[in-house]
Amino acid sequence: MLIRALIVLLIVLNVGAAAWWLTRPAVVPPPPPPLPAGVARLQLVDELPAATTGPSAVDARATPEIPAACFSLGPFTSQAAATLAQDVVKGQLLRAHLREVPGLSASGYQVVMPPAPSLEEAQAIAGRIGAAGFNDFLVVRQGEQANGIALGRYRSREAAERRLSQLQAAGFTAQMQPVGRAGPSLWWLDAGVAEGVDPVVLARAASSGTPQSLECTALR
């Protein structure tokens, strides 16, 4: 009898404990301590507003506008002039790039002796040049270089410099001159504009010649 009574008592106690566990009030955690003034509370990613991580955040990033037309303005005779033209029209350009085109290089080089006071003196110098073992020279008898001595014309600068060094080493005051003058560099303003912008109007504002068509890939 005693054992049976103990078993019944244990059953009743277990049932009571289970009922209390199921019906107990939820435990409310204490509130976090207040943060100092000016310190923001950390937020988890899940707590951030949907607009921050959603597609709208990607759409907000600016993307460069693709030009509808590209062309070159110029030519300008100096970089300063090209820069000034760019400043005048830059408010209407989507893309812009200054481009230098070097002038034509010399077609060759000649080695000469400067003109002597008289033809007789020029012939005397030519005699000394021949006596020093040099050939391929000619006394100039007319033109701006009259009474000078031509000592050879060369395609490359290196060949002309070798000839000049040999003559100077022998005591002759020879000079090297380019054949044909190298022109100055020209500058162009390569530009891309949105649809509706008239290149001819921009050319007039920039004091440029007729706009030259340009592939927009050159402005990447």
Image (cartoon, rainbow, N blue to C red):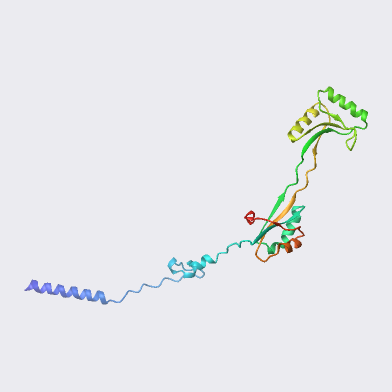
**Quadrant assignment for the C terminus:** bottom right
Q: Is residue 111 visible?
A: yes
Camera-side residue of 78 and 66: 66
**Quadrant assignment for the N terminus:** bottom left
- Image coordinates of residue 183 in percent, x first then y, are 78, 46
Residue found at x 84% / y 25% = 129
- Image coordinates of residue 32 in percent, x first then y, are 41, 71
Quarter-of-image position of residue 22: bottom left
Quarter-of-image position of residue 166: top right
Camera-side residue of 10 and 169: 169
Residue found at x 84% / y 24% = 130
- Image coordinates of residue 161 in percent, x first then y, are 76, 33
- Image coordinates of residue 24 in percent, x first then y, are 28, 76
Residue found at x 73% / y 34% = 158
Q: Is residue 72 placed above or below 38 in the rendered structure? A: above
Quarter-of-image position of residue 120: top right
Camera-side residue of 213 and 161: 213
